[in-house]
Amino acid sequence: MNPLRICFVSSEVAPFAKTGGLADVSAALPGFLARAGHDVRVFMPLYGSIDQGRDDFKPVHGLTDIQVDMAGRQVAGSVYETVTAPDGAPLYLLDCPEYYHREALYGSDPDEHQRFAMFCRATIESCQRLQWRPDIVHCNDWHTALIPLYLRTLYAWDQLFNDSRTVLTIHNVAYQGVFKAGIIGDLGMAGHEKMFHREDLAADRINFLRTGILYADAITTVSETYAREIQTPEYGMGMEDTLKSRGGSVVGIVNGVDCSIWSPEHDPNIVRNFSAGDLDGKRINRDQLLMELGLSPEPGGPVLGIVSRLASQKGFDLMFGILPEILAGNDVRLVVLGSGAKSYESYFATLQLEFPGKVCFYRGFNARLAHRIEAGSDIFLMPSRFEPCGLNQMYSMRYGTVPLVRKTGGLADTVKMWNPDDNSGTGFVFDHYDADNFRWALQSAMNAFSDRDGWRRLMQNGMAQDYSWDTQGRHYLNLYSRLLSGRPVR
Ligand code: ADP
């Protein structure tokens, strides 16, 4: 395959700015593409939370003082360059303090739409200034979803983009970027109103994600099951009809795992490295985790782990009645890392008080602890209501931590139910979103845990799975090549 020019646009890229899996993908997929010989450049905002003084941030010649018309005034931005990782891809950070120096990456300030419209337009204008002709413009989630429309309207005059094809990857259809229709002028789109979805306009709103779905040349999402699910009313969050109208262009590709970061063999965050052939280190990580978090040592039952945004999507409602019951009746431990909705935070805080020595709730975001929980737990709980892909279940398997998941989205595509009769499977899977099913799965996992040989085999099955980007990234290259040669994408 000839080297491609790929403009990869994302609102978060690990480790610079991360709230979830999007950041991991936005670092790892471009890294794979760069190593495969492609000219990939990643664009993201330079948030205030990123250390501005890093001496590896170099201003990009020609990309200072980019002026974009935003809400009737000129807003200036400049681009700094670094790399996503030492062997990664070039990363272009858009510096525009008035928009990106805020308390959090995302918010609800009245100019939220401008922040990301600016990002979209400054990315396009950067390509123009560099006279860099992308073959593929790969957008991610609603924050970048206006780019396909901009290229067909405000920038349609520029032949630079004549042969460019756009891809929109939906990492989570629940987040759409919905604003009052009155902001169309702010976006520079006055006169192009009819390009927006008619029913949205009639309801006095515009929807960034829907706009991207309408105008991107191909739409991908992060697992095959989720690609089907979001074309149904149950999971589509109102996007199902628009997605169905593009049905032939919607492709599911499961995310990969960045093995340079998530491998028990050489993870610097854990106390002892280990592998499928040498699982002794796993026990040491488990002991250490319990000690560090002040939990009672050497439980007879498993250590249950959770690392998650505390959002209703993740299935915590199912745990409400079940966890106290399990904790009261068994010699188990529960370690929870996360923050988010107050109701879940207070649930886990109360559980910790009720079961001292058995439960630890660490409220916040802590990358190192996330690695230590993956390494030190026996069972990882992910009973999501919906899950586009999910990364933690794949990280868990790599660390010999057995995932317990609901059969939805990427969880359905990556975890197979353990069958002790033929020693097949990688985890515990339940179907319907209800508490009894969750209890059944958890009880099954705990029973299986008491069979040491079977459990070892189950851990090793998971550790043998290959979800590396070297494998998954090829599916994206295949998609790009189909798009560029005018073949159907599925
Ligand atoms: P989502 O993108 O829906 O949040 P994923 O499973 O796809 O879920 O990705 C979550 C990513 O964020 C993983 O890398 C996970 O380890 C990380 N993560 C989530 N919450 C925390 C936290 N509180 N501290 C550290 N890492 C976290």
Image (cartoon, rainbow, N blue to C red):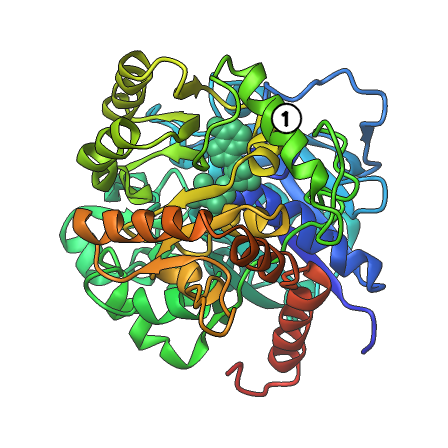
Q: Amino acid at mark 1?
A: Arg
Judging depth in this view, the residue of 82 and 408 nearest the camera is 408
Q: How many marks?
A: 1
Residue drawn at the location 58% of the way across and 15% of the way down: 292
For the residue labelled by badge 1, is the local secondary structure a helix, a strand or a loop?
helix
Q: Residue furthest bottom?
A: 487
Q: Residues within 10 Å of mark 1 (few under 14, many from 20)?
A: few
Compared to residue 289, the image places residue 66 above or below, namely below
Instruction: Tell which residue pokes out farthest to the left in this image.
Output: 203
Q: Disc 1 designates what residue?
A: 368
Where is residue 91 shown, x and y percent of the image? Answer: 74, 41
User: x, y percentage for residue 3?
Assistant: 82, 69
Judge from the rendering whether residue 239 lies leftward or rightward of residue 360; answer left or right.
left
Residue at 47%, 22% in the rendered image: 104
Q: Is residue 191 above or below residue 63?
A: below
**Which corner quadrant holds the N terminus?**
bottom right
